[in-house]
Amino acid sequence: VGSHNAEMMSGEGESGTDCQMSEFFTKAMLHCSIISNKPIMVHMNNLGGDWYSGMMMYDTIRASKTHVYGICWGHAMSMGSIIIQACDSRIVAPHCTFMIHDGSESMNGTCKSIEAWAQYSKKLRQKMYTIYYTRMKAAKPRITINKVEELCSHDTIYTADEAVKQGLADWVLETLEDPYKYFATDTQNAKWQPNMKLGKHESEEEPEEDAE
């Protein structure tokens, strides 16, 4: 899952997380879930993009019946930092850069339509804050939705280690064997749930090949 940031591009190159990427990703995830019940590995280098396409990918990961490992390489910014929150085990490469913010958007149309979309945009931001908050509170029990909103009011940038400390990731990648040796949920094949403890647990089983 790679992209160039739509917010940083000037009409050239990829458009970022878009409908083409999300449709391809969803089909690939569904295929992997059908052919095997082994954990799925998602490799990401994502600077951001479209909210709706990104949430399609987020929902696909959450709907998967198998444990999903997400590994962020290079960047996990904007929409990329949201998508990784859907993964059951969230891993960041040592030099991955994390960034969260409110994002940006433009509107046109009638006054009534703009007002309607502005109200809907507020609802989407609250969903985003909740996604971050739900994963971050395991590492930072005293964090609040208001604090998450404050962090997102501007570009808040983290190193890989800082992202783990903030609860935006579970651990920093050491070797490519990590996803086979460790997991961040109560049991190795479990789907992450809000009441689970955050942590890096070592597997007692022999490493198995992933489905992707």
Image (cartoon, grey):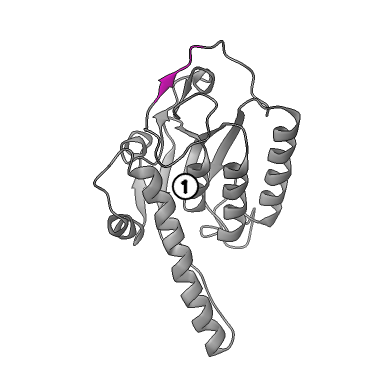
Residue occupying the point 52% across, 30% down = 190
Residue 157 percent across, percent down from the top left: 35, 48
Q: Can I make out residue 117 in this image?
A: yes
SS type, badge 1: helix
**Residue 192 sits above or below residue 21 on the image:** above
> In the picture provided, is 39 more to the left or to the right than 169?
right
Residue ranking furthest to the front = 195
Q: Residue furthest bottom?
A: 111
Q: Give above or below for 210 relative to 17.
A: above
- In this picture, which residue range is highlighted in magenta? 200-204
Farthest-out residue, left: 142
Foreground of the two, 122 or 95: 122
The quadrant in which residue 108 appears is: bottom right
- Picture residue at 55% right of the left edge, 40% below the top: 45
x and y, in percent, of residue 128 in the image: 45, 57
> Quarter of the image containing the C terminus?
top right
In screen coordinates, is 143 left or right of 180?
A: left
| Residue lying at 52% horizontally and 80% vertically, measured from the top left | 116
- How far from the left and from the top, in percent, is residue 19? 68, 56
